[in-house]
Amino acid sequence: MQRYAKIINEDRIIYAPKNRGAWLNYDKNVSLLTADGYLPVIVLEKPAEDKPLRKYREANGQIEQYAAALPAPTKEGQSAKRAAAYLVEIDPITAQIQRLRDETESDEEKIAALIAERAAKVAEIKALYPYPTEPAESEAENA
């Protein structure tokens, strides 16, 4: 069965309401649907693993659904993800190091082990959320 919808933006559509049990099957009456601005939805490409996003566009009196790839990560987005990960994983270790240093007789071996653990976690977080590579200045000048 052909579904009808109105396009909101490239990420969202609103399907026509279904009138189950009504005497005038609104969702099956093409002339009423088109008069109210609903267009048929045609699926060109279903989302897959490499293109998980659903996008919509209006073309030739119909709404076309296609799949799109995830946008490339931005430096600001990766920075925010790193900050959240640091807050959850690094700050408790830093607080524990500070508590050990504040003791009258601090255990330097424990502190050194915690510092090494913190450095390993920081490297892990940086590997998990890498910043996008920026083009070299010479390439930017040639473009």
Image (cartoon, rainbow, N blue to C red):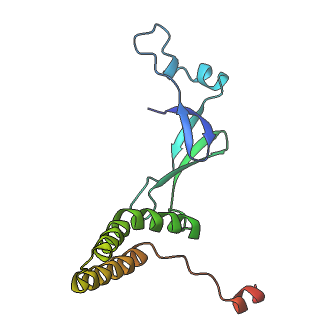
Residue at left offset 27%, top offset 76%: 104
User: Residue 110 location, x and y as percent?
Assistant: 22, 81
User: Residue 134 location, x and y as percent?
Assistant: 62, 81
Q: Is residue 13 above or below residue 17?
A: below
Left of 66 or right of it: where is 34?
Answer: right
User: Residue 52 location, x and y as percent?
Assistant: 44, 57
Left of 126 or right of it: where is 137?
Answer: right
Q: Is residue 57 above or below residue 14?
A: below
**Viewer-proximal residue, 40 or 122?**
122
**Viewer-proximal residue, 44 or 69?**
69
Residue at left offset 66%, top offset 22%: 35
Residue at left offset 48%, top offset 15%: 25
Q: Please give the count of numbered marks on the rendered protein.
A: 0
Residue at left offset 34%, top offset 68%: 95
Q: Residue furthest bottom?
A: 138
Residue 88 placement: quadrant: bottom left
